[in-house]
Image: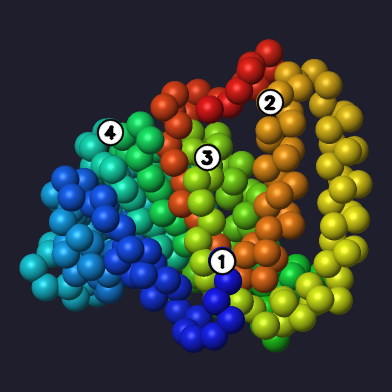
Amino acid sequence: MLAFFGTTDIKHFVKRLFESMDDLNGKVVIDIPAGSGYISGVIRQKGATAYYAFDLFPEFFKADGIKCVKADLTRSLPIETGCADYILCQEGIEHLPNQLFALQEFSRILKPEGRLILTTPNISHLRAKLSNLLVESDLYKRLPANELDEVWHAKGGEIYFGHLFLIGVQKLRALARIAGFRIKKIHAVRVSYSSFLLGVLFYPIVVMFNIYAYFKSYGKRKDIDEKVRRNTYDEVFRLNLHPTILFGKHLFIEFEKCVNGGEIAVYKEQDSIC
């Protein structure tokens, strides 16, 4: 699930995923934020019945024959409830101050068992964790997030933030669960060589601390049904040790909308959480 050579550009991995799909015929696909529309042609060629592109800055969209509509992910989206089979959110969530709201909007828009394909820079890999320890930044050669570097555009009271809201895999997973999603698959990305080297040196220590944290957490939450507790903590534990998470440059995750939507806020006395 890791590519050791070739481009680091996540768009190429997303393009490869859609090119490999054979089930878009008759499907409704929404791309938000659509950016320049790099993979729009691929999605159309795969036979999607409808393809809709939305972006805060539609003037940058360049794909021929497709209209890009202005939409703001910090507000309710002008999209019908339960209409989409797929949503692509590529390099968007790290710009949003209210990430749970955006995920809840995605859940509203998708059909039951619809897919949310999401990418974002990975701050859960080992190099980013070390950089955060040293300089409180995802990259050791860059100062922490600040108002000079992370306000990319401000006009008329609207602010477009840079990577001020970078999100790690565990927080993303938790917010997605609350919004009514579960992780279906973690897709391939390019390796971070420095994270891989750190893994060679420190992976046994990472494993040891995660085993300790697992049993300490599991033992404390006896008020929660044991099956629910085990399923949740097992997934959290696996993510913390997943090679693509620890060593990959991006998070590239495919979520599935649970049939019961976002009705998983209360876990006590439940047999499962979808």
Q: Tag 2 or tag 1, which sits nearer the N-term?
A: 1
> N-terminal of the two: label 3 or label 2?
3
Q: Which residue is mark 2?
A: 228
Q: Amino acid at mark 1?
A: Met
Cα separation, mark 1 vs mark 2, equals: 28 Å
Residue 266 in percent (x, y) is at: 62, 21
Classify mark 1: residues with Cα within 10 Å, few (<14), some (14-19) or many (20+).
some
Mark 1 residue element: loop
Report the disc number at residue 82: 4
Q: Is residue 163 above or below residue 194?
A: above
Mark 1 lies on residue: 1
- Mark nearer the viewer, 1 or 2: 1
**Which amino acid type corresponds to the residue marked 2 in the rendered image?**
Val
Asked if labels 4 and 2 touch by Cβ distance under 8 angstroms, the answer is: no
Q: Which mark is residue 182?
A: 3
- Foreground mark, 2 or 4? 2
3 or 4: tag closer to the N-terminus: 4
In the current view of this chain or complex, which residue is farthest to the top?
269
Q: Is residue 253 visible?
A: yes
Q: What residue is drawn where x is 89% and y is 30%?
A: 219
**In this rendering, is residue 86 above or below 225?**
below
The mark nearer the N terminus, 2 or 4, is 4
Name the residue: 23% across, 37% down: 83
Precedes in sequence: disc 3 or disc 1: 1
Q: Earlier in the sequence, mark 1 or mark 4?
A: 1
Residue 41 location, x and y as percent? 19, 69
Label 3 to label 2, Cα distance in Å? 14 Å
